[in-house]
Amino acid sequence: MFRMISDIGTDAMKDEAKLARMNTLQSDIEGIYAKATVSFSDGQTLALEPGLTQLMASSRNYTKLQEAWIGWRDNTGKLMRDKYADFVTLSNEGVSSLGYHDTGEYWRSWYESPTFEPDLQKLLEELKPLYSNLHTYVREKLMDLYGRDKFPTSGQIPAHLLGNMWAQQWNNIYDLVIPYPDKTSVDVTPELKNQSYTPLRMFRTAEEFFKSLGLLPMPDRFWNKSIIVKPTDRKMVCHASAEDFYNQKDFRIKMCTDINMEDLVTIHHEMGHIQYFMQYKDQPVPFRDGANPGFHEAVGDTLALSVATPKHLQTIGLLNSVENDEGSDINYLLSMALEKIAFLPFGYLIDQWRWSVFSGETPKDKFNDKWWELRCKYQGVSPPVERTSTDFDPGAKYHIPSNTPYIRYFVSFVVQFQFHKALCEAAGQTGPLHKCDIYRSKEAGTKLGDMLRLGSSKPWPYAMEALTGQPNMSAKALMDYFAPLTAWLEKQNAGKQVGWQDACSNQRHAPLSANEQQAKKWLTEYNMAAQEVFYEETEVEWTYATNITDYNQQKQTEARLKLADFQKEAAANASRFDWKHFDDEQVKRQFSKISDIGTSALTDKNKLKKLNDLQSEIEGIYGKGKVCLGGNKCLTLDPDLYDILTSSRNYTELTLIWQEWRNVTGKKMKDKYEEFVRLSNEGVRELGYNDTGEYWRSVYDTPTFQKDLQKLMEQLKPLYEQLHAYVRKKLKKIYGAEHFPASGHIPAHLFGNMWAQEWENLYDLMEPYKNKAKVDVTPELVRQNYTAHRMFKTAEEFFTSLGLKPMPETFWNKSMIVRPAGRDVICHCFCLGFL
């Protein structure tokens, strides 16, 4: 308690003149925000509430939305930039008296965790796949409405198109993205108006929910002194908020209520604060706060998860019927995701920006640059027009001028699902978490009330454990809640570029052409050009593989870069066509493959060149690899090392060969390969893939590919284990059991193959019945004087016997089927098509 009393924040400022100046600056900044209006080119002037908010929610006019977005920022943030910079300096000076480095460190101290920042980052990473799929689904819908030419090529969504002045929640565009329009709508706004709901009735409805749980009713002072309708005789900051007046009896809400479902949910949120205030009012003053700031935000939202269910809305008479089918469930979950999941990156990045400002990492001239760096990277939204360092877009969000810490909302949006799950269990609810309604459950109310009464008298993990049975923040309950939607979104986004690049691009997509005939003509031109470019690149690949020199390595890199440029240009041209909506499936498939250009998508040409240089260097290390066993005797992989591994049964010799090959190949390329992987991943991420592995797997056209492989492996495992045991027993007899680990593994160098990938060269050691005819015809091939050429002709004859095509003359004239003398080559068998 004494620590809390002593930790007084900026009030610790010793210089009273500076303290007064700081408070004046904050009042000035808040005043700029509260008084701001936007005057439109048509003569209309709107304040934020309700005018601009309603416009952003309901308008589908791209230009009008852009005008509102720009005007609000010009008349708020831009006017407070210098004052805010001075405020930051004074705020930091105030908390430094308490031993904090800056205000950000002071704010983070409230969470009483040394791992708070990495814990937040981990939560965001866990949630990113769901957010990315939601983002992609919404982006595609909005592209269809506004046109692709309004969207940056980097994959972000213009920030003014998401139904909210700050793009923080997207529920106002639900009508544009609803999956199943014929299902009953979960937006009860029309019914609220049809039943003549007033702000007071909405507040009474929220109070009744709390009372149904056995929690406290709102006191008379609350009803007498709260402001729930915007006053007409004065200006007021309309951002909804709840206040505790610290006299144990006066608690109020300030809100400019509109008659819609969003505000009905907001009322429950704000009343959750009031309930928390009332529950801990008898604690000492230092403990009259949430267990952590996120808990305070989560309480009302936890109950709102029940309030927003179709089941509850039907119970209170705002929904006529509840449809229990997949379509209705997906509609509901998507509407919730537009509110809850869409918010998460925004809730995270606000204070990431502010902490960087407080710490000095981001100076005043970089305020706006840093803001958009974070919004582009984490939220995947872009400014609708170019922004400059003289703009101050963070100031257009209420919590910046009011100096209200924001990470609490991110925490809240995670822990509210943990709370919800715990209360549903207390209420005896079973079934999917998204269908749970704890209305009228006294058991759930008791459990919640017990936690609320703790206030901040205990560290937050204690309060978390009291309610949920464990002490940590976790995204699991949230992911469980949205699991059906996650699976649905993944199906909708199959074949699309999921996600966005870290940085916003100023380049916009070219307008689409819906002319399928024009697209087919372009494909014909593309295929002619592609055949020539791919032929040139493959020819150079072949030359390098069959004659490894520095000159050929340089030529290979040049050819790969030329091919990458061609692929990028082709992908950009392909994007001019609305090919995903073409009727011809083969045409769509061609466009899909042309657009999916792998690491060629890497926009940084220097990085792309480095990537190709690294690949050539790694291949060169492998191709030139030789094992020198002493003197001048250096052995190539093929045929020298192959022959030894195939025929030798000398444990020491095989060990030496195995180890030295890895010393002269893998060990030398390790660092290069690490850099290659990083650049390769960076390249395919520009196509929306998480990494190169995901890109490679995509060519198999099945979302269950990895699971299918695992299933196949499990089916084959019993046979493989029996074979392994048989071979191990035989090899132990030859080499001695002392060379085999107790774990049951077989040393990798004893299989007759450099990589133990196939074991046929051990057949003479494993043959079960020695007196039977041999399957290995190697001796007969030698006895009949087979040459490499004759072996290839024998293989060709098999194909022609089936009526398939013979090898063309160019195959016989240009193939390399015998290792040439006097030069290094990559002897690993491969074939190339020269298109």
Image (cartoon, helix red, strand yellow):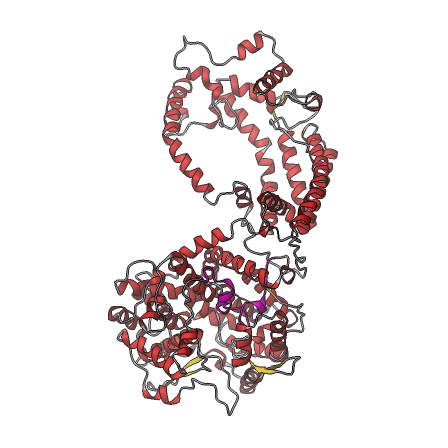
With 307 as the anchor, is 678 left or right in this view?
right
First to last magenta residue range: 155-181
Examine the rendered structure and indicate whether residue 177 appears above or below residue 49.
above
x and y, in percent, of residue 117 in the image: 48, 62
Q: Would residue 561 be visible to someone looking at this image?
A: no
Magenta stretch contains residue 346? no
Q: How many marks?
A: 0
Q: Is residue 129 visible?
A: yes
- For residue 172: magenta? yes
Q: Nearer the viewer, residue 524 or 118?
A: 524
Left or right: 343, with 536 as reference point: left
Q: Position of residue 767 (x, y in %)?
A: 42, 15
- The quadrant the N terminus occupies is bottom left
Placement of 62 over or under 607, stated as above or below: below
Q: Quadrant of the C terminus?
A: top right
Left or right, residue 240 beside residue 360: left
Quarter assignment of residue 543: top right
Q: Above or below — where is 670 with respect to 289?
A: above
**Which x, y percent locates residue 576?**
66, 53
- Outermost residue toward the bottom? 233
What residue is at 66 percent from the left and 37 percent from the top? 616
